[in-house]
Image (tube, helix red, strand yellow):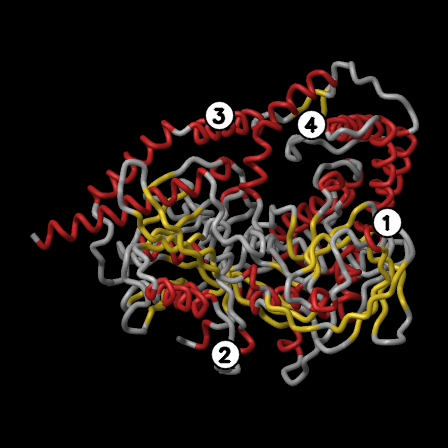
Amino acid sequence: MDSRLRPKTLLHPLRSLSPCRILANRWSASSMMLIASLVMVCSSPQDASAQPAVAAQPAAAAPLAVPSARDSVVARTIAKLMPENHISAQVLNDTISQRALKLFTDSLDPLKLYFYQSDISEFDLNATSIDDMVRQGDLALAYSIFGRFIQRVDERVAVAQELLDGDFDFTADESIVIDPESAKYASNPDEARDRWRRQIKYSLLDLKDDGKDQAEAVDQLKRRYTRYARRWKQTDSDDLLEMFLTAVTMGYDPHSTYMSPQTLEDFQIQMRLNLDGIGAQLSEKDGKTTVTRVIPGGAAAKHGKLATDDVIVTVGQDDSGESVDVVEMPLSDVVNLIRGRAGTTVRLGVKAGGVGNVEEYKIVRARIELEESAARGEIIEHTMDGSPETLKIGYINLPSFYLDMESARQDKQDFRSSTRDVRRILQDFQAKQVDGVVLDLSKNGGGSLTEAINLTGLFIDRGPVVQVKNSDGSVQQYADEDSGTAWDKPLVVLTSKFSASASEIFAGAIQDYRRGIVIGDPATHGKGTVQTLMDLGQQLFRNNRANFGALKVTLQQFYLPDGESTQLKGVLADVILPSITSKMDVSEGDLKFALEHDRVKAARHSVYNMKPADLIGSLRQRSMTRIAADKEFGDLLRRIELYVSQKEQNTVSLDEEQFMARRKELDSQKEEEEETLETQLSAEEIYRDNFYNREVMNVTHDYVDGLRKQNLAQLN
């Protein structure tokens, strides 16, 4: 494969929606799932609203003072590289400036709870100057806006604490705006106070619905708002630079971002699927770092003492380094202290079960393979109702198109990649005489372009997989050059609105070659752009490995072999299965400043006879008949209808009786939504046996059976 492809990536366009995710040490404004250390993070459900957009190194409880000379250099470099490399070739101008300002203020105050309208009007005086400022490395405006934000946070939290000491009338006929686009900034302190009074009523009702009494709910909110203010004040210069410059780059398109040094490291961990750490899943509960899981085979598991529900209160380095108190410390910073080079020692001060005396555990860090984020396969023996035949269906869960880029560049023989792992699984399926394969990309948000091409090559015998268009309009074809296939039996690709980028290249190519079928949501995410990572340290100092972070810039658009773009449109399913995800506003078209859809000339390629039109029609009809008769799908369809109706409401009543009635309706769909949004399977679980996946197996069974009958008819 052309080595020029190696650094190019098709990154996840969405924030992780899972309540558990691998922690990003810097919560950037870029919309990627990032991995920081193992030491996975689960947000506490009752405190989800307390999580700010940024987590940072511990710092003094005051706004940042002035940007550093290094930050100015980074800003000037971004201003130079964006117009030179972005597919639009657009100069950094007033239009980008205006977009950047709104994106930046929205990232700080998305619900319009903190800034006054007068603040926004004041900021708008510089709306067309950001381009000139960034070119000059002038970050004073970013620091000024952030300083004003911290001031407003202090003011609002003080008001909130005062209001929480008072009484609330839960019978009043009033409501709260829950749609950020419909919300307005307060014009004066009285309006701000009323907004917060309503916000607090909403939160109190929410906590009451969770079983808290009034006193417990008030106490929890007081602690929540205090922590929220403290966390924002712990923002460091890297965090602020990342937020501001990402607002500038996302003024071009939603996938161009600036990665701080920490975010870049996190991304590299995600792509190579390994890291050095202790192997524990952590969460923050009421300011305490709590162990929610010890990863089997990891350093903590081998140590033998750290257990679920333990609370970590101090962290020290090596055998005698000073121990740092981590109570009330942002979880990302606790992770920074715990992670480190394999073979080194970390000392954890632990309260077993969260109670009693503190005991010190010395754990030697080790290399941890993130197997739960790698391709995993399982053979499902499936029998259709009314059919005597049992088929072996191979199910592969592929969370991302990962590639250890650095090892691949160095031509190491054992580098990790999704293609290598899937090939190994397919070889096992072949040996066990599996009849058909389901490749689950329903939660796969992208990854390496190289891997999208190579993985497609496991199922086709040479030919163009993707076409890319550059900023000058030229189009290149990238093909699978390897002869032969790893799997020539029936293939079903499972997709959803969360399937993006590399997933769409793979699914679209399989469709264009008529090599298999796509089932799931009506369409995939609709991201048809290619990003590359530009290491700023290397850009600035060719022989210096200094980490200045990286620019992720959209430099190309991609097209399927038949010339169609997935941009905005996505890949359309051959067989549609009902799901709540199809109704969520999480597609490319829902993102601001997404590029337009177009197409290029079709590439010449072979076509397989594995997608006959009459068989596709039969698969659809049989699936619809089963779904119509299935009680669980019937319940799902009702939940979808309720979800859509609730989603269209911009306001929520704060009358307790009406609020609880609405919440009861929402709770009826809660279980399905949680299952749908959960992106992490357990360590042991590969295939989740539920009514939705059983229908996936039914369609696959029909597909395998239909192709067999077709081939038999051709032989006769």
The residue carrying pointer 3 sits among few (fewer than 14), some (14 to 19) or many (20 or more) residues within 10 Å by Cα, namely some
User: Which residue corresponds to mark 1?
Assistant: 230
Residue visible at 86% across and 65% down in the picture: 360
Residue extending farthest to the left is: 716
Mark 1 falls on what kind of element?
helix
The residue carrying pointer 4 sits among few (fewer than 14), some (14 to 19) or many (20 or more) residues within 10 Å by Cα, namely some
Q: Amino acid at mark 1?
A: Arg
User: Which residue corresponds to mark 3?
Assistant: 638
User: Which residue corresponds to mark 4?
Assistant: 177
Depicted 544 relative to depicted 714: above or below:
below
Q: CA distance from mark 3 to mark 4?
A: 25 Å
User: Which residue corresponds to mark 2?
Assistant: 414
Nearer to us of marks 2 and 1 is 2
Res 372 visible:
yes
Q: Amino acid at mark 2?
A: Asp
Residue visible at 31% across and 61% down in the picture: 433
Q: Are marks 2 and 3 in contact (CB under 8 Å)?
A: no
The residue carrying pointer 2 sits among few (fewer than 14), some (14 to 19) or many (20 or more) residues within 10 Å by Cα, namely few
Nearer to us of marks 4 and 2 is 2
Find residue 274 and report its horizontal and vertical position in percent: 61, 69
Q: CA distance from mark 4 to mark 2?
A: 54 Å
Q: Earlier in the sequence, mark 2 or mark 1?
A: 1
Res 72 visible:
no
Q: Earlier in the sequence, mark 4 or mark 1?
A: 4
